[in-house]
Each structure stands twice: as structure tokens, then as C-alpha cells.
Image (cartoon, grey):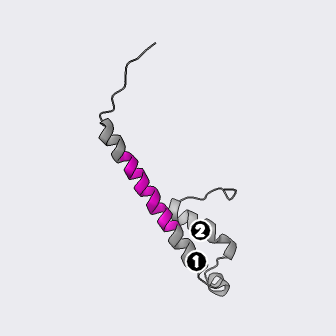
Amino acid sequence: MDTTATHTGKGPTGSVAALFGRVREALEQRRIYTRTYRGLSALSNAQLADMGIHPSMIRRISLEAAYGRAVDAAR
């Protein structure tokens, strides 16, 4: 059995910094989602229709704005 540890050169502070970076990115994505969702939800159906958006599309558009890709609608 090989018990050799692989050293990445990051150490504990590097992995903690990476964790905080991922958390910060997730919070920013959530902020974008929430802002987009609330902004589109505040519009009337007529205003949405003028932009070619059906009210049922608001969630998907908000997710794509935040995460940059289409997501599974079953989520």
C-alpha cells in the first residue's frame, strides 16, 4: 500500500482561501440570480411580452444570467 502524500504546495491557508473564493463566487451568482428574478418579476405581462419573454421563462432566464448556462428545469 502506497502511503505517500501528494503535496500540492497550497497548504492549509491555500485551501481555506480557495474555499472562501468559491463561497464568494457562489454568493455573487446568487445575487445576480435574485436581482434578475426580482427585476423581471416586477414587470407587467405586457412589458415582458414586449421583450419576448413569457412569465414562465423568468426563472430560467435568471438562472442563465447567474450561472451562464441552461439548467435542468426539474431542479
Who's the residue at 46% across and 56% down the image?
Answer: 26
Mark 1–mark 2 CB contact (< 8 Å): yes
The residue segment tinted magenta is: 18-33
Answer with the quarter of the image where residue 64 lies: bottom right
Asked which quadrant contains residue 61, the reply is bottom right
As rendered, which of 67 and 3 lies closer to the eye? 3
Which quadrant, please, contains the C terminus?
bottom right
**Mark 2 Cα within 10 Å, few/some/many (few <14, many 20+)?**
some
Residue at image x 37%, y 46%? Answer: 18
Q: Residue 73 at x, y = what percent?
A: 68, 59
Apparent side of residue 8 relative to residue 38 in the rendered image (left or right): left
Identified by mark 2, the residue type is Ile
In the image, residue 66 sits, relative to residue 35, either above or below, namely above
Residue at which label 1 appears: 40
> Residue 62 location in percent, x, y?
57, 68
The amino acid beneath tag 1 is Leu
First reached walking from the N terminus: tag 1 or tag 2? 1
Residue drawn at the location 70% of the way across and 56% of the way down:
74
Q: Secondary structure at mark 2?
A: helix
**Relative to 13, is 33 above or below?**
below
Q: As drawn, is 39 to the left or to the right of 28?
A: right
Residue 36, position in %: x, y?
Answer: 53, 72
Residue named by callout 2: 61
Say if the magenta span includes residue 5: no
* Residue 71, quarter of picture: bottom right
